[in-house]
Amino acid sequence: MSSKTRIVVLHMKEVIYTAIFLVLGLLMIVLLLIMFGPSKDKETASSVQTTSALTGQYLPGVYTTAIELNDNTFDVQVTVDSSHINSIELINLSESTAAMYPLMEPALEELASQIYEKQSLEDITYEDDNKYTSMLLLEAIKSALAKASVLQQ
């Protein structure tokens, strides 16, 4: 049995290029795994929402809904904590808009007092004189509370 010795000659330049390409390939694979792999942020966000869902029905904060009447825009602002509606008020209501719609503020005060007492929008009553104004305000309050709702998140 004859064995011939084989000598392999490697140029240092080729070895360095091969090593660089292997390192870049490994970095690319790691980067792809990090970018497209399962994310821990999604898991923590869902656990935060689940925790807040167990503790209350709202995400604490200030929520607004815009109302537009004849090119006049103002906002209904609802402030909530985790389980209570704390305040409901009109903001950005100009004097001219308040003069054009004088029932807006008294109707909101009447609705807000009922909502504070019941902590719900169910079984809210209003006078026939303020029917459409009250319905408009209730829809705006409902929209703001929908933004604050944990179940909606």
Image (cartoon, grey):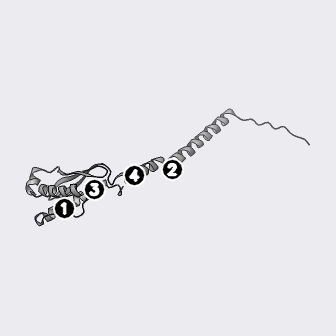
Which residue in the protein does label 4 denote? 49
Camera-nearest residue between 61 and 38:
61
Q: Is residue 26 left or right of residue 75?
A: right
Element assignment for label 1: helix
Snapshot quadrant of residue 131: bottom left
For the residue pair 29 and 14, the one nearer the viewer reads as 29
User: Which label sits on residue 136?
Assistant: 1
> What number is the disc on residue 145?
3
The Cα atoms of the two marked residues, 3 and 2, are separated by 35 Å
Which numbered disc covers residue 44? none
Q: CA distance from mark 4 to mark 2?
A: 23 Å
Nearest to the eye among marks 4 and 1: give it. Answer: 4
Residue 151: quarter of image: bottom left
Q: Are marks 3 and 2 in contact (CB under 8 Å)?
A: no
Indicate the position of residue 8 as horizontal and vertical percent values.
76, 37
| Residue pointed to by mark 2 | 36
* Callout 4–callout 2 Cβ contact below 8 Å: no
Earlier in the chain: of badge 3 and badge 1, it is 1
Nearest to N terminus: mark 4 or mark 3: 4
The label nearer to you, 3 versus 2, is 3
